[in-house]
Image (cartoon, helix red, strand yellow):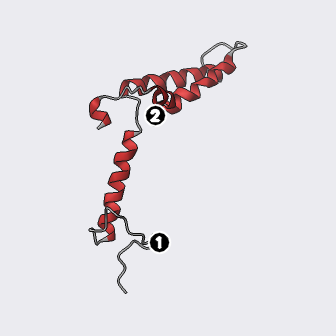
Amino acid sequence: MQRDHAPGVRAEPDADLTHVKDWRERLIIKISTLQRDCSIMNNVGSVDRIARILAGLLLIAFAIPIGFPHTGWNWAGWIGVVPLLTGTFAYCPAYTAFGVSTCSAKQQS
């Protein structure tokens, strides 16, 4: 019995991949399409990412407090989780809401 799909994968034909007979080739095409689609979701550029990560780490260090004096406002440093995560994943929901992107044209394509 010849199998034209990967073991453990449902054999549903894709409308745009029906011309590809080998399941390995279809898998490679799907992965490359997924990678391209995921890169579209990035809207935070390189310089912006570095600034966000550094600001997030500094704010979290203030919250713990590492190298900062203990004040009554140290809890506010936990807001640093937000820029740390948005910098790490290169995606900012607020940028999406306002239609902003700091990615260069080369990063977006």
Which residue does the numbered mark 1 point to in the structure image?
8
Residue at image location 46% in from the left, 31% down from the top: 96
Reading the image, the residue beneath label 2 is: 91
Q: Is residue 23 above or below residue 91?
A: below
Q: Nearer the viewer, residue 12 or 46?
A: 12
Secondary structure of residue under mark 1: loop
Mark 1, other Cα within 10 Å: few <14 / some 14–19 / many ≥20: few
Taking the image as shown, residue 50 lies to the left or right of residue 70, namely left
Q: Quadrant of the C terminus?
A: top left
Where disc 2 sits, the SS reads loop
User: Where does residue 98 sit, x and y in percent of width and height?
Assistant: 46, 25
Q: Which mark is residue 74?
A: none
Compute the Cα span from label 2 to label 1: 32 Å
Name the spot of residue 11 as percent of width and height, x first.
42, 72
Q: Is residue 65 visible?
A: no
- Give how far across and how far down residue 53 sits, in percent: 48, 27
For residue 76, side relative to residue 14 (left or right): right
Q: Which badge, 2 or 1, is on the more N-terminal residue?
A: 1
The residue lying at 47 percent from left, 72 percent from top is 8
Q: Which amino acid does label 1 sit on?
A: Gly
At x 37%, y 25%, the residue is: 102
Between 60 and 107, which is closer to the camera in this rendering?
A: 107
